[in-house]
Image (cartoon, rainbow, N blue to C red):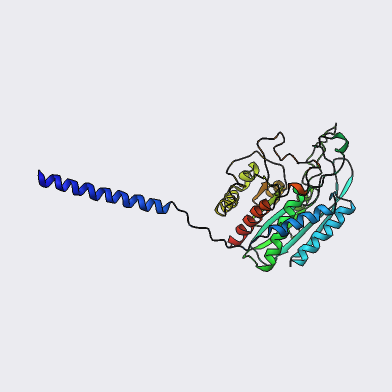
Amino acid sequence: MKTFRNFSFLCILAFSALLVSCNSCQSQKAIPEPYHQVSPDFNADSAYSYVEKQVGFGPRVPMTAAHTACGDYLAAKLSSFGAEVVEQKASITHYNGKDIAIRNIIGSFQPEKESRILLFAHWDTRPFADREKDPAKTNQPIPGADDGASGVGVLLEVARQIQQKAPDCGIDIIFFDLEDWGQAEFDDHSVPGNWWCMGSQFWAKEPHTPGYKAKFGILLDMVGAADATFMREGESLRYAANIVEKVWGTASKMGFGQFFPRKKSGSITDDHIPVNQIRKIPSIDIINLKNDSSSGFAAHWHTHGDNMQNIGKTTLKAVGQTILEVIYLEK
């Protein structure tokens, strides 16, 4: 019995040592490996200046002097960054019976490459502030710092970085026009039809390159607010769930998870819809969505409060660096 008891004691000691060893291994495995960034550093100060420059022109409502001046600036900037620039100009009869001149601005990097990624945002601003609390201001156009300029500003900085270090894939950046001139909420008579995203609808039917294809597309809309939350939007999950996972997963690895929560949201009508439905390019929407507001958007949405005071460089950095990382990881 004495020998057996000693043997049992030794077994217990050995088993205990094994448990400690295993727990130690598990503890070591629980420490995540530091993420090694492959993309160039996104400059938030630069992106902010591009947002500020657009707002400085005034509201970019189609067929206004500010719209023309800003469009010239955007085309020139893309060209200066080495993009092959093409402009689509057309006249579209809108819900109000008026013919609206539109201008889609497209910058292509390494156009000879067959493998391509599409990045896009709208650059026009809403001609009225139908969410404004002051009735005297509802018919005045909004500044559009977040709703329009923020996505364009991020993509201009992405373009600048691409010029300095080309990714393996070809990149097409499109600034769509006439996205935000949907019928006003204060209109008494609703006109049947899809009056949002007119520029992207036009391009999806008549792309700048016949038969244009891309591996996937990423839309940036309202990506500048300091308290932004980019929930996983419904139509993005429907058409391109794998791209949502790619982008949100990359953001998390890079430490931007607070901006890209794993929460799902409802579906949004935005420029990614015609790209998905008509052009058949799996595309997602990175857009600031809120569960605690009646509109589902930030408080400054479609108001005169959509100004530079809402733009946060940390948010621009989170979005821009995530986008850069995604495109530089693609082969």
Front in this rendered view, residue 64 or 320: 320
The reply to whether residue 78 is in sight is yes
Marks counted in the figure total 0
Of residues 65 and 98, the one drawn nearer to the viewer in this rendering:
65
Figure quadrant of the C terminus: bottom right
Corner quadrant of residue 209: bottom right
Horizontal side of 54 relative to 39 (left or right) equals right
**Residue located at (81% from left, 50% from top):** 124
Q: Is residue 121 left or right of residue 329?
A: right
Picture quarter with the N terminus:
top left
Q: Position of residue 145 (x, y in %)?
A: 77, 49
Q: Is residue 3 left or right of residue 300?
A: left
Q: Residue at the location (50% across, 58% down)?
A: 34
Q: Residue at x 20, y 48 (%)?
A: 11
Asked if residue 259 lies left or right of residue 194, the reply is left
Name the spot of residue 121 as percent of width and height, x first: 73, 52
Q: Residue furthest left?
A: 1
Q: What is the x, y in percent for residue 24?
A: 36, 52
Residue 213 visible in this rendered orientation of the protein = no
**Residue drawn 78% across the image and 52% down it:** 123
Q: Is residue 165 above or below residue 219?
A: below
Q: Is 88 drawn above or below residue 126 in the view shown?
A: below
Picture coordinates of residue 73, whole percent (x, y) = 82, 60
